[in-house]
């Protein structure tokens, strides 16, 4: 066997071993779909319920999407005190958003904060946090809709004072739009109900996702300055808010949890270019905060060490095996059958296990994600690792102008 073939076989074998152990432990610790059910305990009377402030940052959101988000927040069945802070982060389409704001201007629960220029999601969140007073704070992305019982279920979980943050399950709100949104919906299910669910077994969800993450106010205030002033290589970090804030919570000694039956539906990219830009942001954030998370592993369960290794070393081994396979084709004019066979076998096992756990045959089609991962996401992760100092949001890039004044329940 030639050098490239040998190196590729070794890399894919190590990847198969690591991935098999990691995914096997993940499935072992994560509950099955049949066990995802609401707590049998009765919620406490409303007088004992914590007050909740919902924070909705908004930048150049489509009016219909923002309207659906705010409607889902307004229709929560939560019996306790609920306040909502909608932060318009210098949107250039504020005139289009005015009717949406005015719809809720008469609702005493809703407050609108209008930032004069775009400051970024993190600054928008902090603007609301510093004006809020609730016992718990729920961050909601402006393109996300919440199930009516979302707040109730997250609050019920937060009754344990050792928990600093909790997230619900994410689904794709536009799942039926394209083949890509269907794949992303399955990807979200796996990320929530395998990865996060297994981490939650040890009270250490490593990233409470931005669209539906709740925080204990007293815990959040302890880390707020660190969150606001995060630097990377001397530069202000302005993305990866959810992962960094979660790591800070763990670092402060709080548990982070996952509630599978608290559902939030978020709009996902329906085009490959948008999806890859999102993946690039996430990859940079993951690499940055993994360095911070390494310091925590000594006091967390050993499974979390395996989790970090599996998520970071696994893709590296897979990338090496793919590169060696391509080199083998180009230089030796031979087909890397061992690599191809192993990847195909692992894909079949992965999709079959997912279909059984989710009890949905559609997960068999998740095999279509494998070539995207191999030939697009892996090179993108390599690029992200080489450009960690680049803080470009790679999302909306409209030229921002000072917004016009707005009527409503305004907080200066």
Image (spheres, grey):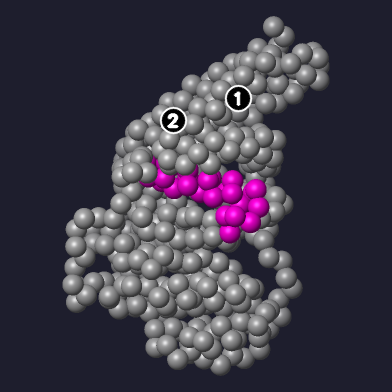
Quarter of the image containing the N terminus?
A: top right
Q: Which mark is residue 257?
A: none
Q: Give the residue number, with chain letter if any, for mark 2.
A: 22
Q: Residues within 10 Å of mark 2 (few under 14, many from 20)?
A: many
**Residue 319 to residue 41: above or below:** above
Q: Is residue 98 left or right of residue 410?
A: right
- Residue at screen point 21% across, 65% down: 43
Q: Is residue 214 left or right of residue 267?
A: left
Q: Is residue 225 left or right of residue 330?
A: left
The image quarter in which residue 148 lies: bottom left
Q: Residues within 10 Å of mark 1 (few under 14, many from 20)?
A: some
The region drawn magenta spans 174-199
Q: Which residue extends farthest top?
A: 1
Q: Nearer the viewer, mark 1 or mark 2?
A: 1
Magenta span has 87? no
Q: Nearer the viewer, residue 309 or 232?
A: 309
Question: Contact (CB < 8 A) between labels 1 and 2?
Answer: no
Q: Which mark is residue 344?
A: 1
Q: Is residue 301 left or right of residue 310?
A: left
The image quarter in which residue 90 lies: bottom right
* Location of residue 201 in the rendering, given as x and y in whole percent from the top left corner: 31, 43
**Residue 245 to residue 358: above or below:** below
Of helix, strand and loop, which one carries label 2? helix
- Residue at screen point 71% across, 80% down: 401
Upstream in sequence: badge 1 or badge 2: 2
Assign the magenta stretch its main secondary structure.
helix
Q: Is residue 359 visible?
A: yes
Q: Which residue extends farthest front?
A: 361
- Residue at screen point 65% across, 48% down: 179
Q: Nearer the viewer, residue 402 or 151?
A: 151
- Residue at screen point 43% across, 83% down: 110
């Amino acid at each position: 066997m030639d050098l490239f073939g040998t190196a590729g076989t070794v890399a894919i074998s190590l990847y198969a071993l690591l991935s098999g152990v990691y995914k096997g432990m993940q499935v072992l610790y994560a509950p099955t779909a049949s066990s995802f059910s609401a707590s049998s305990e009765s919620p406490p009377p409303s007088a004992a319920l914590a007050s909740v402030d919902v924070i909705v940052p908004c930048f150049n959101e489509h009016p219909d999407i923002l309207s659906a988000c705010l409607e889902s927040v307004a229709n929560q069945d939560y019996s306790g005190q609920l306040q909502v802070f909608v932060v318009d982060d210098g949107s250039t389409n504020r005139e289009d958003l005015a009717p949406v704001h005015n719809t809720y201007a008469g609702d005493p629960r809703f407050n609108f904060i209008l930032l004069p220029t775009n400051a970024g999601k993190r600054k928008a969140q902090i603007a609301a946090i510093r004006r809020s007073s609730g016992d718990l704070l729920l961050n909601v992305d402006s393109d996300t809709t919440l199930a009516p019982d979302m707040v109730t279920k997250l609050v019920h979980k937060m009754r344990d004072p050792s928990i600093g943050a909790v997230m619900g399950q994410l689904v794709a709100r536009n799942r039926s739009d394209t083949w890509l949104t269907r794949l992303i919906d399955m990807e979200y299910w796996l990320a929530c109900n395998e990865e996060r669910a297994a981490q939650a077994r040890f009270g250490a969800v490593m990233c409470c996702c931005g669209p539906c993450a709740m925080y204990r106010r007293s815990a959040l205030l302890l880390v707020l300055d660190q969150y606001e002033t995060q630097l990377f290589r001397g530069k202000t970090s302005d993305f990866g808010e959810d992962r960094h804030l979660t790591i800070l919570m763990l670092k402060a000694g709080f548990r982070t949890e996952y509630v599978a039956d608290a559902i939030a539906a978020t709009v996902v990219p329906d085009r490959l270019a948008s999806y890859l830009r999102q993946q690039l942001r996430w990859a940079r954030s993951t690499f940055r905060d993994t360095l911070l998370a390494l310091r925590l592993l000594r006091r967390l369960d050993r499974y979390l060490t395996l989790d970090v290794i599996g998520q970071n070393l696994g893709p590296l081994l897979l990338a090496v095996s793919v590169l060696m396979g391509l080199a083998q084709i180009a230089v030796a004019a031979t087909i890397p059958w061992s690599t191809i066979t192993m990847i195909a076998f692992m894909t079949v096992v992965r999709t079959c296990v997912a279909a059984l756990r989710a009890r949905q045959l559609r997960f068999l089609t998740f095999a279509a994600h494998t070539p995207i991962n191999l030939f697009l996401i892996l090179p993108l992760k390599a690029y992200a690792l080489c450009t960690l100092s680049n803080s470009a949001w790679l999302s909306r890039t409209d030229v921002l102008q000072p917004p016009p004044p707005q009527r409503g329940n305004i907080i200066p």
